[in-house]
Amino acid sequence: MRILDALALPGRSVTRFGSEGFTAGTVARGDSLQIGVLRLDAGGCIGRHPAVERQILLLLEGDASVSGELDHPSVELGPGQAATWEPNESHETRSRTGMTALVIEGYFDIV
């Protein structure tokens, strides 16, 4: 058995797509799946970009405001809630107070 502390995993700073206050770290990856931990500082954002594959963001702590395509309104998430995006769907994530989230990207079914 191996114990991972997702809240303490190191991450790298990401500025692509105009992102600010955003760090990402990888928990696990395989041929068609990647699992990571994302963090946003207070006032940070993951800039609008297209999902490469199906993606689910599960908020672990903090707050998140997520959006899909530009013609859809943002939705506020609290800890334990998740948002999903389909391949090529444009999306953005922001946080007022900061957040930590688990992100799964790849080929999987959402139940």
Image (cartoon, rainbow, N blue to C red):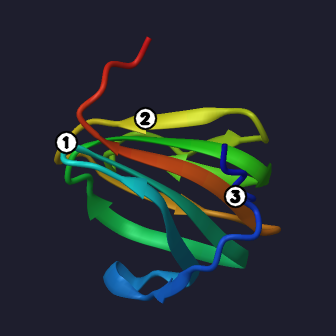
Where residue 23 sits: x, y (%)?
56, 79
Relative horizontal placement of residue 104, taking residue 21 as reference (left or right): left
Alpha-carbon neighbours of circle 1 within 10 Å: few (<14), some, or many (≥20)?
A: some
Numbered disc 3: secondary structure: loop
What amino acid is at disc 2? Thr
Query: Which of these two is toward me, 71 or 63?
Result: 63
Where residue 59 sits: x, y (%)?
68, 46
Which numbered disc flags the more N-terminal residue, 3 or 2? Answer: 3
Where residue 50 sits: x, y (%)?
23, 57
Circles 2, 1 touching at the beta carbon (< 8 Å): no
Q: What number is the disc on residue 76?
A: none
What amino acid is at disc 3? Ala
Q: Residue at x 75, y 59 (%)?
A: 5
What amino acid is at disc 1? Pro
Q: Which residue is mark 1?
A: 87
Circles 1, 3 touching at the beta carbon (< 8 Å): no
Cα distance, mark 1 to mark 3? 25 Å
Alpha-carbon neighbours of circle 3 within 10 Å: few (<14), some, or many (≥20)?
A: some
Q: Which residue is mark 2?
A: 84
Q: Quadrant of the N terminus?
A: top right
Q: Which residue is mark 3?
A: 6
Relative horizontal placement of residue 33, taking residue 44 as reference (left or right): left
